[in-house]
Image: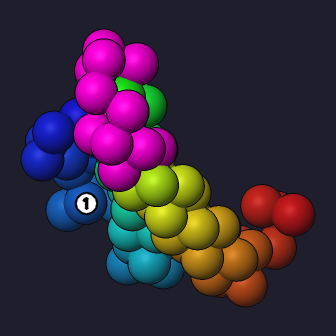
Amino acid sequence: MLSEMPIKLERVSKGDQEKEILRIGMIAELDAVSLYEQLAAMSENQHIKRVFLDIAKEEKTYVGEFQALLVMQDTEQE
């Protein structure tokens, strides 16, 4: 994704925009996790590898936070 919106929010109904914003946040975090894990795999330096993996783990918690909010906003998400 790298800063590109996957959906045009102006085309989404007002009632669904909050849900879509949360989904976009989840996509961004999952992209970040994927990128950091790939970079960790490419590095031979154990310190750099560990930092990237720690950051990826932190990003995963943000995915969970967005998901929890989405479940509260969209009962079908359960």
**Percent of width and height locating residue 58:** 49, 64
Instruction: Residue 72: say if magenta.
Output: no
Note whether 60 is above or below 39 in the view shown. Answer: below
- In terms of depth relative to the viewer, which is nearer, 70 or 47? 47
**Callout 1, which amino acid?**
Leu
Instruction: Residue 44: say if magenta.
Output: yes
Identity of the residue drawn at 39% across and 56% down: 55
Identity of the residue drawn at 60% across and 76% down: 65
Identity of the residue drawn at 42% across and 44% down: 50
Q: Quadrant of residue 18?
A: bottom left
What residue span does the magenta drawing correspond to? 41-53
Note whether 65 is above or below 44 in the view shown. Answer: below
**Mark 1 sits on what residue?**
9
- In terms of depth relative to the viewer, which is nearer, 25 or 15? 25
Placement of the N terminus among the 4 image quadrants: top left
Res. 23 in view: no
Position of 71 with respect to 12 (left or right) is: right
Is the magenta region chiefly helix, strand or loop? Answer: helix
